[in-house]
């Protein structure tokens, strides 16, 4: 027969409360994701506000000089590596004759300056400005002829032939290849600036016009059979194509460097490694 009874037991257990679960999840987040979570919390809860970031400890003159020396050495090494490259096409080294402009001038400013300096008629300058406004940072024309015509309100109306003629003059500006509507046209514009007696030039222009897909897949056998050319002639033509810059606009306005903010600093102090949490980018909240 069953009888009711009371029993007393002692034990330990870990209860994952919502607060503990949230703390564990936040501890695993990197700084960028943590900042995103904090920003979301600030937008949802009007009672929260962000405190000022703590001042970053100042470094001594010796340590600053050491950091600057390291940066200068790294910059020299990177420049030396960039001087021997192929414009982004393959890994075969060649000396570079052009370097990116670090003056801070944008591609648009560079092209507009040339519109004023070159022999453009006043009407062509207006058309050229509309064309330049449609060129992206890589140097490619994103808008079509019809879209450019819609942006122009002149009397008498601008014709399609005038836009094509002005675009041809814009494509002769620096950097060579700017204003192209496709990668094929960009390469052909750059190849057209070479001496016509250059070995493999005619073949290179033909490949750039119709067979870039085979170059991308490295199907050189099919390319040689389709063009009915020798291996040496094909090699010369491909070398000319690889020497072109697929993004000519970046030679004037290169993409800005993106710096990574570390989560922690590891320093060797008195032969002992110390780990410090980076105070940069870690906001503090208060209620």
Image (tube, grey):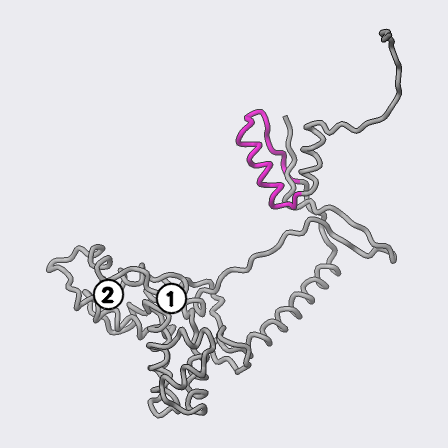
* Crowd rating for badge 2 (residues with CA inside 10 Å; few <14, some 14–19, many 20+): some
- Give percent across and percent down for residue 38: 60, 36
Left or right, residue 89 beside residue 185: right
Q: Which residue is mark 1?
A: 139
Q: Which residue is mark 2?
A: 125
Left or right, residue 84 beside residue 9: left
Left or right, residue 191 beside residue 131: right
- Give percent across and percent down for residue 55: 68, 43
Segment colored magenta: 29-53
**The N terminus: image quadrant:** top right
Query: Can you say whether 232 is above or below 242 in the image?
Result: below
Give the mark nearest the N terminus, 2 or 1. Answer: 2
Left or right, residue 95 beside residue 68: left
Kindly identify the residue that appears in the image at 79 percent across and 55 percent down: 267
* Crowd rating for badge 1 (residues with CA inside 10 Å; few <14, some 14–19, many 20+): many
Q: Residue furthest left?
A: 156
Is label 2 in a helix, a strand or a loop? helix
The quarter holding residue 196 reads bottom left
Count of numbered labels shown in the rendering: 2
Kindly tell me whether residue 189 is visible in this rendering.
no
Query: Can you say whether 7 is above or below 218 in the image?
Result: above
- Give percent across and percent down for residue 250: 44, 67
- Give percent across and percent down for residue 231: 45, 90
Q: Say whether residue 47 is magenta.
A: yes
Q: Residue furthest front?
A: 1
């Amino acid at each position: 027969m069953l009888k009711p009874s009371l029993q007393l037991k002692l034990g330990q257990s870990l209860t994952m409360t919502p607060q503990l679960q949230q703390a564990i999840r936040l501890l695993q987040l990197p700084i960028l994701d943590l900042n995103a979570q904090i920003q979301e919390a600030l937008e949802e809860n009007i009672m929260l506000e962000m405190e000022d970031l703590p001042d970053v400890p100042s470094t001594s003159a010796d340590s600053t000089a050491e950091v600057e020396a390291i940066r200068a050495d790294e910059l020299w090494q990177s420049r030396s590596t960039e001087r021997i490259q192929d414009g982004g096409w393959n890994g075969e080294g060649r000396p570079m004759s052009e370097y990116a402009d670090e003056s801070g001038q944008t591609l648009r400013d560079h092209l507009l300056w040339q519109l004023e300096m070159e022999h453009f008629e006043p009407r062509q300058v207006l058309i050229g400005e509309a064309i330049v406004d449609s060129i992206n940072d890589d140097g490619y024309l994103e808008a079509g002829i019809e879209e450019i015509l819609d942006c122009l309100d002149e009397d008498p109306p601008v014709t399609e032939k005038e836009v094509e003629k002005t675009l041809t003059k814009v494509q002769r500006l620096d950097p060579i290849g700017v204003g192209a509507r496709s990668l094929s046209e960009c390469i052909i514009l750059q190849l057209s600036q070479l001496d016509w007696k250059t070995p493999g030039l005619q073949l290179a222009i033909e490949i750039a016009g119709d067979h870039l897909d085979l170059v991308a897949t490295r199907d050189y056998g099919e390319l040689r059979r389709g063009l009915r050319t020798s291996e040496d002639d094909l090699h010369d033509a491909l070398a000319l194509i690889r020497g072109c810059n697929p993004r000519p606009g970046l030679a004037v306005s290169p993409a800005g460097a993106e710096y990574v903010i570390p989560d922690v600093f590891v320093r060797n102090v008195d032969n002992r490694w110390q780990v410090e949490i980076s105070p940069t980018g870690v906001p503090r909240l208060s209620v």
